Image (cartoon, rainbow, N blue to C red):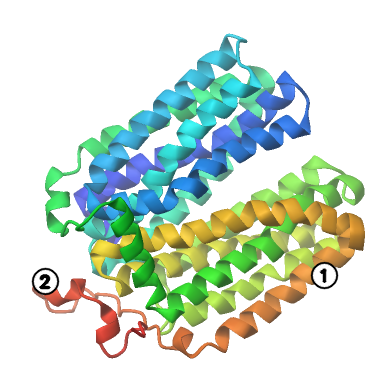
Amino acid sequence: MFAPLAIRDFRHYYLGQTASAFGDSLTPFAIAFAVLHLTGSPVDLGIVVLSTRLPIIVLTLVGGAAGDRFSRRTIMLLTDLIRFAAHGVTAVLLLTGTAQVWTLVALQLVAGAGSAFFNPAAVGLIGSLAGREHLQAANSLISISRSATSILALAVAGALVALVGPGWAVLIDALTFLVSAAFLSLLPRTLADERPQAGGGLLASIGGGLAEVRRRSWLWVWIIHVALANVIVVSPILVLGPYVAERQLGGAPAWSAIGIAYAVGGLAGGLLGARWRPARPMVAAVLFFLLMAPLPALLALPADVWLLGLAGAAAGMQLVVHNVLQTTVVQQNLPESFVARAMSVTMLGSLVAAPLGMGLAGPAAAVFGTRTVLVVCATFTVLLTMATLLVPSVWRVHGERPVRASDPVRASDPARGRDPASTPGHGGDA
């Protein structure tokens, strides 16, 4: 489980990303209360939240192409510095009392653009740092750090906003980007030389990445699965869960308790993902999606908070295990030179679906009732799982056996970077 941390370059990357993950959990909370302090308008809050997502939706495919074409280390360094500047200016404006909604929107657009380039490159870089034999453990360790830091960061953010104002929380987030950049600067520049450069321009690179995804039915089925899950299951919970908590469970403390349980479940999911090597990882990830069903079902009743906390923990575990297995399968089953582009397509599907689901959840609840919508969420979880498992290629995706200490040392195989679809036992169906 901890083997990747013995690799110096991965350890540097991991420490930087742990610091950055802590900051990432501070800013959404702080920005939300900053907007509410400025205008008190939920419309303004929605505009600012959208400004954080919009550039990621628009630029993710470009970011994936850049991550496969140029040095991932350099891209991540530059985008960390860009996000440090954006959040740093935001913090200064909030601390000096000169922030306005339009300035927050503009700065969040810049920060979101940085994330659109950073995230696909980061997924591609992990294989170069940890090695293919440690991919799943490395992905799990990153998920564990995100879950653990989010628990701490939410408590810190609440205290900072209440005691000294949201500007200080945003400032801490800005500084964590500098910490991340400092650790990235320690990585060897030769990482870029291990990967063949993509030919043609960025548009040609995007087209090549889409073609690689299209050739593998298991991958685009997975992307559709994630998108539908976000639209019909996850997003309505995020919108209607606080509403149910406010109306019937005693307000914010109840929803906060469920959220903490969700983060604890994510931490447990990271521990499980680090050690579990299912023979058919895509089947395992899809089956784990069933753990989402109890939360909307119990919210529909609504059940006691302690039961909802258990359901939240199950949902958090599901999310992390699903993400670890999905990321690892993509890293193992695609040529290394296409990993960033393939992940950018996957990210785009979920990014577009999430705000769509959030926008539809409220009107649907107004027309059909909150309880009905939540029951549909729980039911659809089961139906989507069954439908996805009916696709034959889902069952043909195989995991790689973990390397054990007793295994003989193997020389690197140049064929490992080729398309696994041509190798028996792997899930591509080109």
Q: Secondary structure at mark 1?
A: helix
Q: Residue at x 40, y 61 (%)?
A: 343
Which of the 4 quarters of the picture holds residue 406? bottom left
- Tell me where residue 37 appears, x and y as whole percent: 73, 21
Mark 2 to mark 1 CA distance (whole Å): 51 Å
Task: Name the amino acid, label 1.
Answer: Val
Whichever of callouts 2 and 1 sits on the residue coming sooner in the sequence is 1
Q: Which residue is mark 2?
A: 412
Task: Name the amino acid, label 2.
Answer: Ser
Q: Disc number at residue 198?
A: none
- Tell me where residue 254 appears, x and y as whole percent: 79, 47
The mark lying in front, picked from 2 and 1, is 1
Which of the 4 quarters of the picture holds residue 76? top left
Q: Badge 2, how many Cα within 10 Å: few under 14, some, many 20+?
A: few
Residue 117 vertical placement versus 264 (above, below):
above
Tell me how many marks there are.
2
Q: Residue at x 44, y 74 (%)?
A: 219
In this view, which residue lies farthest toward the left? 411
Q: Of 284 and 336, which appears nearest the observer?
A: 336
- Tell me where residue 251 appears, x and y as whole percent: 84, 42
Q: Secondary structure at mark 2?
A: loop
376 left or right, relative to 231: right
Q: Badge 1, how many Cα within 10 Å: few under 14, some, many 20+?
A: many
Q: Dots 2 and 1: beta carbons under 8 Å?
A: no
Residue 301 vertical placement versus 409 (above, below):
above
Q: Disc number at residue 375?
A: 1
